[in-house]
Image (tube, rainbow, N blue to C red):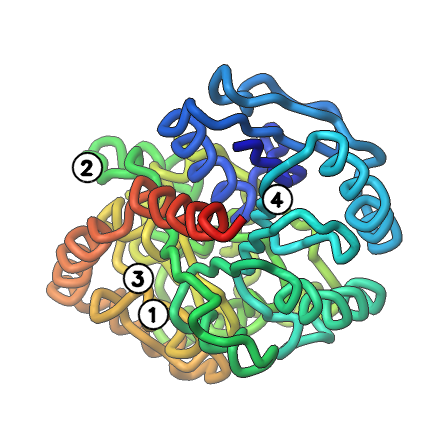
Amino acid sequence: MRIAVNTRLLLKGRLEGIGWYTFETLSRIVKSHPEHDFYFLFDRPYSEEFVFAENVHPIIVGPPTRHPLLWYYWFEIRIPKILKKLKADIFLSTDGFLSLVSKTPSIAVIHDINFKHHPKDLKFSHRIFYNHFFKKYAQKASRIVTVSNYSKTDICDNYRIQASKIDVSLNGVNTNFHPIGIDQQIAIRKKYSAGKDYFLFVGALHPRKNISRLLEAFDQFKSKTNSTNKLLIVGAKMWWNKQLEASFNQMCHKKDVIFTGRKSPEDLNQLYASALAFCFVPYFEGFGIPILEAMKCACPVITSNITSMPEVADDAALLVNPYDVDEISSAMIKLNWNNDLRSELSARGQIHAQHFNWNTTAVNLWNSIEKVMSEC
């Protein structure tokens, strides 16, 4: 079979959630199925590290897809011609975008439809595009793969898709994440938080990550406890906006908030493993991989009690209402003072995270591909 894959989010040094999903699943699938040819479609020069095996054939399909007009041009003009030229049997798109004009059977991995529920979190042009096209993509797809039961139900309900058309393939977590020793933890705290305990957030500073309320909750925690704790926020500031700026400037304890920028997986491991607790309270997630990364590192977790997060965290985290600043702050206070609770959540989290691995995710995605193959 000739399988064409949208790999435009495989960006060297800049892998985010969907990019990591693409990397972890495809690196396994292509090696497990050398009998098939995979055509990786990049929208810019690619890194050789993404050519995972000899049966991978990278193709640059310009121009780079930097905004909605170019998304449309790439998927509706460029991609159909490439698929036809390749005589592709299947088109796999790990970011959910499809070509509506191509006749090639297609699989869309739709991680979530957050834009349906929180359109104002996106630029006007982006939300118009997503809300217009993703329903069409879902209806056009031969099969849909998504990453949680929550997202499956959400897609079914909002796009009127039959449940039998959607496969759930839960995300995995990198096996390299692990706890570290006390001496290493002390060294990391000296490096990043002046030797003080710290709460940790990891993720893009996107509005739905609820950073404003997290900052407010931390400020409240500091005022109530007089603690020397810091808050480390790890992630690129590409989504930094006026609301976040105002929330930060209004803090009484903003000197105790440390923005580290993006970090490598190795640095993340050390940051997770040295944190007092991981505070991840978005108001929408299709999955939430950082929850499991923290658990793998024996870091207690505070996360939201809505969308997919209870499904991912189960009983191995403190669940809070992400819209309730007092509740988030109270959870911080509880974990700061209660050593036994921290130890209990740490132990539960390590056990729970073992149920999620990328090998299983890749096998499940391949099963979906085989379902479409059998219908071709």
Say which quarter of the image contains residue 148: bottom left
Q: Is residue 105 left or right of residue 241?
A: left
* CB contact under 8 Å: marks 2 and 3: no
Name the kind of residue labelled 3 in the image.
Val
**Badge 2 is on which residue?**
182
Cα distance between the residues tagged 1 and 4: 46 Å
**Badge 4 is on which residue?**
91
Q: Which residue shows up at 77% across the image and 71% down it?
A: 132
| Front position among marks 2 and 4 | 4
**Badge 1 is on which residue?**
332
Residue nearest the viewer, comparing 161 with 181: 161
Residue 37 spot, x, y in % from top left: 53, 26
Say which quarter of the image contains residue 163: bottom left
Mark 3 nearby-residue class (10 Å; few <14, some 14–19, many ≥20) = many
Residue 11 spot, x, y in % from top left: 63, 33
Circle 2 — which element? helix
Name the kind of residue labelled 2 in the image.
Ile
Q: Earlier in the sequence, mark 1 or mark 4?
A: 4
* CB contact under 8 Å: marks 1 and 4: no
Residue 312 spot, x, y in % from top left: 33, 64
Name the kind of residue labelled 1 in the image.
Met
Q: Is residue 248 left or right of residue 296?
A: right
**Badge 3 is on which residue?**
301
> In the rendered image of this protein, does residue 167 appear above or below residue 151?
above
Cα distance between the residues tagged 3 and 4: 38 Å
